[in-house]
Image: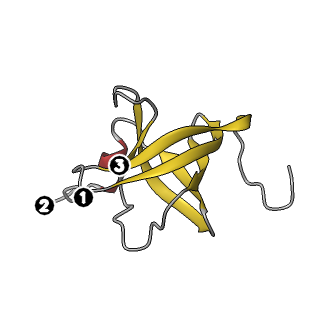
Amino acid sequence: MSGGERRIEKRVAFERPVPAQLMAIDGTWRRECAIEDVSDDGAKLTVGASIEGLQLTEFFLVLSSTGLAYRHCKLAWVNGDQIGVNFLKAGDKKKGARRAPAEA
């Protein structure tokens, strides 16, 4: 593992970055980006335009020009024009759900 590397899962680094887009869940914004590397759990992206002021709690990483291939993401980190994203899987939203007390 390199100095700041905390990943456990294997990642694939591309020889040439793969073009993609970030898109708001509600479709109100889009940003061009390039995928630098990817793993089962996330990716490192280079973003072409500012992400300042965008709602990056949840968004889509659109992988195809038709929009049929995408991943549901959340922002993990920002370093200049590069960002890290974590891929959300079905059921991830439930992790923060409140539970009823065990005893009434």
Place of residue 26 in the rendered image (x, y in percent of width and height, measured from the top left):
21, 51
Residue tagged 3: 23
Residue tagged 1: 98
Residue at screen point 34% across, 26% down:
68
Q: Secondary structure at mark 1?
A: loop
Residue type, label 3: Met
Callout 2–callout 1 Cβ contact below 8 Å: no
Mark nearer the viewer, 2 or 1? 1
Distance between the Cα atoms at labels 3 and 1?
Answer: 29 Å
Residue type, label 1: Arg
Residue at screen point 63% across, 69% down:
80
Residue nearest the viewer, comparing 96 with 78:
78
Residue tagged 2: 104
Place of residue 34 in the rendered image (x, y in percent of width and height, measured from the top left):
58, 45
What kind of colouring is applied to the model shown? secondary structure
Pointer 2 local density, CA inside 10 Å: few below 14, some 14–19, many at least 20: few
Callout 3–callout 1 Cβ contact below 8 Å: no
Distance between the Cα atoms at labels 2 and 1?
Answer: 15 Å
Q: Quadrant of residue 74?
A: bottom left
Place of residue 57 in the rendered image (x, y in percent of width and height, measured from the top left):
37, 60
